[in-house]
């Protein structure tokens, strides 16, 4: 998450409205290892540009990056996904609990509501035990229903 915020901040430092343009978005995506075609870039912008501004604010950017990570995870090795899981699992107990999820999301520096965090937890916690285990994490990242 921190790398997304850092990348976003680099490209909005000169923007008065705190948003990145579609041109800048392509640069950000390439910096993060994504290589969308111009058509894919436009589709991504259309999908997340909720206010119709033609620019992407951080919340819209984060939604887009999560979608890209989920799509990209289909090609990721088990080891790469395990590394990502460990990044979230701060206390290394094999689970991502609400506090760990909250900590990662708050590390972005953006205002994220408790409802947003609880909704993400609910989406990932398939067995409703209050935490996300590795299998649930894999399922969430791969977009398996």
Image (tube, grey):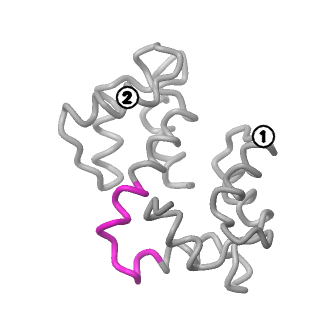
Magenta range is 69-81
Task: Determine the secondary structure under disc 1.
Answer: loop
Point 49% across, 49% down: residue: 4
Point 42% across, 56% down: residue: 69
Point 71% across, 49% down: residue: 119
Labelled disc at residue 1: none
Q: Main secondary structure of the magenta part?
A: helix
Point 38% across, 65% down: residue: 73
Q: Nearer the viewer, residue 37 or 109?
A: 37
Labelled disc at residue 45: 2
**Residue 126 location in percent, x, y?**
66, 67
**Residue occupied by mark 1:** 113
Point out the tag, 1 or 2, that comes first from the N-terminus: 2
Q: Nearer the viewer, residue 105 or 115?
A: 115
Is residue 76 one of those drawn in magenta? yes
Is residue 46 one of those drawn in magenta? no
Quadrant holding the N terminus: bottom right
Quadrant assignment, res 36:
top left
Q: Nearer the viewer, residue 116 or 53?
A: 116
Q: Are marks 1 and 2 in contact (CB under 8 Å)?
A: no
**Residue 103 location in percent, x, y?**
74, 59
**Residue 140 location in percent, x, y?**
53, 63
Crowding at dot 2, Cα within 10 Å, few <14 / some 14-19 / many 20+, comes out as: many
Residue 56 to residue 123: above or below: above
Residue 127 to residue 25: above or below: below
């Amino acid at each position: 998450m921190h790398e997304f915020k850092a990348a976003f901040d680099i490209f909005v430092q000169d923007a008065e409205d705190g948003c990145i343009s579609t041109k800048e978005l392509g640069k950000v995506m390439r910096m993060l290892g994504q290589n969308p075609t111009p058509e894919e870039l436009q589709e991504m912008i259309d999908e997340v540009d909720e206010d119709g501004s033609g620019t992407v604010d951080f919340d819209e950017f984060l939604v887009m990056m999560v979608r890209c990570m989920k799509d990209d995870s289909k090609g990721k090795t088990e080891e790469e996904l395990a590394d990502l899981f460990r990044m979230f699992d701060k206390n290394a107990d094999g689970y991502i609990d609400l506090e760990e999820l909250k900590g990662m999301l708050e590390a972005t520096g953006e205002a994220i509501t408790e409802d947003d965090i609880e909704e993400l937890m609910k989406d990932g916690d398939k067995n409703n035990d209050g935490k996300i285990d590795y299998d649930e994490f894999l399922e969430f990242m791969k977009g398996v229903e």
